[in-house]
Amino acid sequence: MESDTHTLPPLPTSLLYPTTLYQSPPFSSLLQTSSTVHVSLPLSPLSIPPCPTWLSPTAPVSIHLKTESLSPLLDSLSPPQFLDGQNLHCLNSPTTSDQDDLTCLNWLHQRGNLLPLQPLPKTTPLPQLEPQDPIPTQNHLSSPSKPPYSFSSLIFMAIEYSPDKRLPVKGIYDWILNSFPYYRAAPGGWRNSVRHNLSLSKSFCRIHRDKNQSVGKGSLWCVCPEYRSALLEVLRKTQYYHSTNSNLLNNPALLEGADYGESMVCDTVAISALTSDNPPLSSNPPCPLTPDHEELVNMEAVEYEEEVGEEMEKDPLSDSGYIEFHYYQYHQYQYLVLPGDTELDLETVEILQLDAEAQEAAGSLLDLAGGGH
DNA sequence: TTGAGGGTAAACAATC
DNA sequence: CGATTGTTTACCCTCA
């Protein structure tokens, strides 16, 4: 196992949109009041559309970093690309009830034009199912591969990403086309499959349009609340499998956590309620793994000023001063994405490969995350 | 071997 | 009238 450090091409900023801030105050506030901040910079697999954290299978790795070196990074995450105020509001504010709901998918809408995905350099190595496989990103300019998602999952995502949580068939088509260019060149049979799924699956229900407002043909389709969690679980499994190739999902304890009333493992996720009769958690659940991730990297002692607001009391990491990055697996190696040296600059981001010991620790943590085998 | 789940194709009716 | 939408049936494949 190698333990050297690899310096990779600049990390696409599209990979660095924040997904979870654990009720942290907005960046501006953080920069003004706190010596350290706690952010999460997910690295979602390129094969999937920008995903909310509830889809993220990877446990976060926490790193201590000083804020003075953090400013360039935060600056680079400035709006409008993905850190607009609304998004931060969505991610942060415990007072925004609708944002807490449904695992806060609204951040995607607020990001506006992030779908389709921004093109990403092919040179960026990211975790994929098999090392020999081409990266199944939909951002490849040529011959995008078929997404691993079932049509049910595609429909589910399309509907969930829609502002009103309901879409006409045409809207579902459009979302799939925009999100997965594979289907632009694919034979038209997939549309039939979409309709077939809508009709056949109990997970989706049809809403007859108000004839007074009827524009276009057909009805609106939405996700039946009682099947929502199941769809989410399928989606999570799909992404999990195709992103980490981990056997975590084989762990019953992990699946037991899929009641969505509580956190599953610690994938940086606040898995809030998924059904209307299952109210969302008022705050993001604790992230029991994160402190342990200190074992993965050498931590730098930092000072932390307790000026981040009352809502931070709910934040399990609020007093940690952590800055949080995802680590992921690629070619059986586990990687940690963190800024290089003292300057946090996206142009010089390095991806450090964990040494064997760290990988072992990470594996232990993953086992722990799965509730043991 | 079997059943479930999923993908695809096709036919058909209803609707716009 | 053509395109779109929605339903249904059938067949195939994969996987547990």
Image (tube, coloured by chain):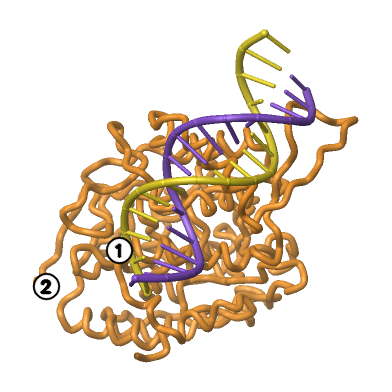
Chain colours: A orange, B purple, C yellow
Is A166 on the left or on the right of A244, as rendered?
Answer: right
Which numbered disc flags the more N-terminal residue, 1 or 2?
2
Is A126 on the left or on the right of A156, as rendered?
Answer: left
Image quadrant holding the N terminus of chain A, namely: bottom left
Could you say where residue A160 lies in the image, as x and y percent from the top left? Answer: 63, 52
Q: Residue furthest right?
A: A212
Q: Residue A337's mark?
A: 1
Residue matched to label 2: A3
Report the Cα–Cα distance between label 1 and label 2.
14 Å
Picture residue at 34% right of the left edge, 90% below the top: A373
Height in image: A310 above or below A20?
below
Q: Secondary structure at mark 1?
A: strand
Asked if residue A38 shows in the view, the reply is: no
Picture residue at 31% right of the left edge, 72% below the top: A246
- Mark 2 neighbour class, 10 Å CA radius: few under 14, some 14 to 19, many 20 or more: some
Say what amino acid the circle numbered 2 marks: Ser
**How many numbered discs, if any?**
2
Query: Looking at the picture, do discs 1 and 2 lie on one chain?
Result: yes
Height in image: A187 above or below A76?
above
